[in-house]
Image (spheres, rainbow, N blue to C red):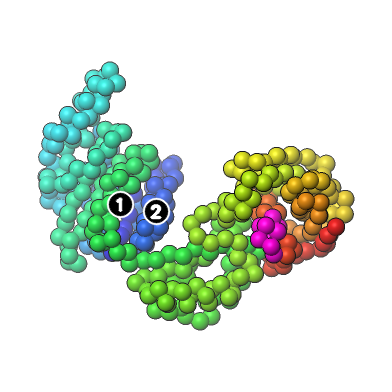
Amino acid sequence: MRIEIVSTGDEIVTGLVVDTNAAWLSALLLEQGWQVRRRATVGDNLADLKAVLRESSERAEVVLVCGGLGPTADDLTAQAAAEAFAQPLTLYPDWLATIAVRYASRGRAMPDSNAKQAWLPQGCDVLDNPVGTACGFLVRHPASHGLSQLFFTPGVPFEFKQMVREQIVPRLKALAGEQTDTELRRFYTFGISESALSDKLDAAPWPAGIELGYRSSMPLIELKLIGHGASAADMNAAEARLLSEIQSWLVGRGDQDPARQILALLGPRSLTLFEGESRGALLDACHEHPYLDAHFSQQLASDLALLEGSDEGLSLTIGTAGPDGVPLLLCADGESIGQTLKLSHPDPDSGRKILAFAALDMLRRHLSGLPVITDYLTLPRTATRRE
């Protein structure tokens, strides 16, 4: 099933508003097994809107259109759909009554301009909006590839997301016959660069119908095995090949954030943090853990031999930068294991995230029964400590 997304609005084209809706929607659809093939952004121009709607409908079985359903003169999406597919705007009295009831429930009279939101392309299906005045709608258009279904939604994120989950995803599942044509498997690495991974993984082709994707999300590199109609055996073989190359740097897999996966290993155990050079980045990664005690000090040692943690329980300490790097210390029930890492990154914020995850990885390895100290290709080690 080929899916495309169209985002509308001058504020998005000009960069005044970041298009988080399209990113969220693409990720949600991929989790369901559908990979978006193309995304387009178009401003509030009637001719441009009509053109992009026609173009997408000729390529895709499903087109998801976000924005431009408001009551003002620059909200042109319904008109564009009506003209693009020769389905004249028609008053939908039931939705007009719904808008009026919404205003009445708030003790307000409905402005005349809101009536515009009840004029929709003739013959379309209304998609309910339980929290706003702009309903969504579904237009079916015969195309060269068969039938194209275009789903139109408001752009307000809260309304848009609720409509997608409750109105659109169930329809897409029915359209696909509950069968997904795409399978996604996620893996996360730390301490190795994207280019080094490419050297290891791209030398030989993957099986037919399977591709490998990369996404840099500081401080991690996410790897995505994407199967398009691939068999379970081929996907399993591809995963085994991938893991054989990345196992040394693998820090998580699946849809959950790796930091959360590490914290889940703690269970009800408490964790104490002492932060210097990371300046709160470690706390930011761990803040959801309910048994957390965090401290920040600019006076923490830069010498690994002098760095201290907690005498009891579990603690992570990130010291201050010294000539040899930044010292990190894990204290676990009276045992202390540490290392000094030489960090070199042009962006200070990214550098702090790297230090924070390096500390978390020490915790992960301890809780998983692995050697706490491991080699990172992107972080030279200048000292170690074990007591």
Number of marks = 2
**Residue at image point 28% right, 35% down:** 130
Q: CA distance from mark 2 to mark 1?
A: 9 Å
Q: Which residue is mark 2?
A: 28
Task: Give the residue pinned by disc 1.
Answer: 169
Of the numbered discs 2 and 1, the one sitting upstream in the chain is 2
Quarter of the figure that contains the N terminus: bottom left
Residue 305 spot, x, y in % from top left: 87, 54
Q: Which mark is residue 338?
A: none
Amino acid type, callout 2: Leu
Q: Is residue 88 above or below residue 225?
A: above
Residue 122 picture location, percent across and down: 12, 45
Q: Would you say the residues marked 2 and 1 are in contact, meaning their CB atoms lie under 8 Å apart?
A: yes
Q: Nearer the viewer, residue 338 or 149?
A: 338
- 10 Å neighbourhood of mark 1: few (<14), some, or many (≥20)? some
Left or right side of 229 for 257: right
Q: Amino acid at mark 1?
A: Val
